[in-house]
Amino acid sequence: MLNRIAIGLLLGISMFSCVSKKQYQSLEQQKDSIVRVCQNDRREEIVFRDSIINVVRNVELAMETQRLRASALNDSLQICQRQMSENSTYLARLGENLTEKQRKLAEEIELKNKAIANKELELNDALAEAEKERLRLQKIREELEAVSQRVIELEAELRRKDSAVILLKEAIMKALAGFEELDIQVEYKNGKVYVILPEKLLFKSGSITVDPKGVEALVQISKALNEKRDVQIGVEGHTDNVPMKESEKMKDNWDLSVLRATSISRILIKQGGISDKRISAIGRGETMPVASNDTPEGRAKNRRTEIILTPQLDKILEILNQN
């Protein structure tokens, strides 16, 4: 039901570490789109299930009407058959010497016999129609059961994913228990965990070298992430809007944010022992502020690094693509 290209996109995300900004943004958008499609598809499944239930109810009502009609025809048929039997017996007693009145009666009986035959045909047609409705109803019920089972499986997998993300957040917060004074934030939103590291923890102004205390915090985070190997890791660097002095390595804040994200990714890989296939790094520069750049406090909040933890969606995509 969902485009199978979504699976290829998600698998593609898990097979690179450091990519260009444009590629990463495209893949992030596609990945977020998958989550929205999962949620929309879940709502569509439920709406579809409700519409199927309404169809089933209408079919059952039609079948009950056909049954009552068939019953009435059958009763009428039995009455006519009794009358025909009685009339046939009467005709047998009359023999050859029929009066004009008796001949008319015989004609009437013949007409009644024809009417009985027609009613038998109508009854057979009604029974055949009822059987067709029964088979159609059975097929609809089977389809409804299959859809309902998929909805149940999808809901269970979504609950499992949400529980896993919440447990991941708790594990990260536990790993950072000794760093409360460093103003590290751990947030859960949109099905992901965000670890927000302020600049003062990681870097000196304009530097791309991580301070020792920051390295220590990153190593602790790595320990928690190594126990959750089905989680993809994105490292995003952010700056304020104050222009930096151009150098050989960096021309602007965008370069600074990219190099900082790369520095943190290398620490997670080399000193944290995380597979480079799970990590991607990107610089956002000053394009995604979380506070106003008009005050020192706001600019300090904007100078940050975000480690974004995303659970794999393979199982959810498998359920959505079941025929």
Image (cartoon, helix red, strand yellow):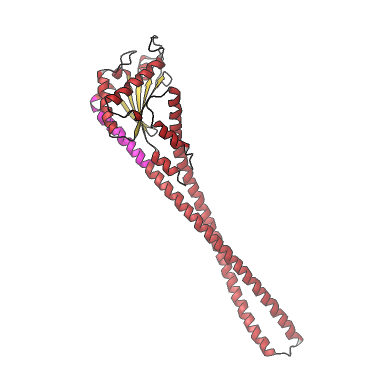
| Magenta highlight range | 158-178
Residue 121 on image: x %, y %: 63, 70
Residue visible at 68% across and 75% down? 114
* Residue 17, placed above or below residue 137: above
Residue visible at 34% across and 33% down? 231
* Residue 29, placed above or below residue 249: below
* Nearer to me, 74 or 30: 30
| Magenta-drawn stretch contains 272 | no
Magenta segment, principal secondary structure? helix
| Magenta-drawn stretch contains 171 | yes
Q: Hey, which quadrant is residue 113 in on the image?
A: bottom right
Query: Would residue 92 appear left or right of 4 to someone viewing this image?
Result: right
Query: Would residue 215 appear left or right of 113 to someone viewing this image?
Result: left
Residue 105 on image: x %, y %: 72, 82
* Nearer to me, 260 or 127: 260
Residue 83 on image: x %, y %: 63, 80
* Residue 62, placed above or below residue 307: below
Query: Can the viewer see residue 76?
Result: yes
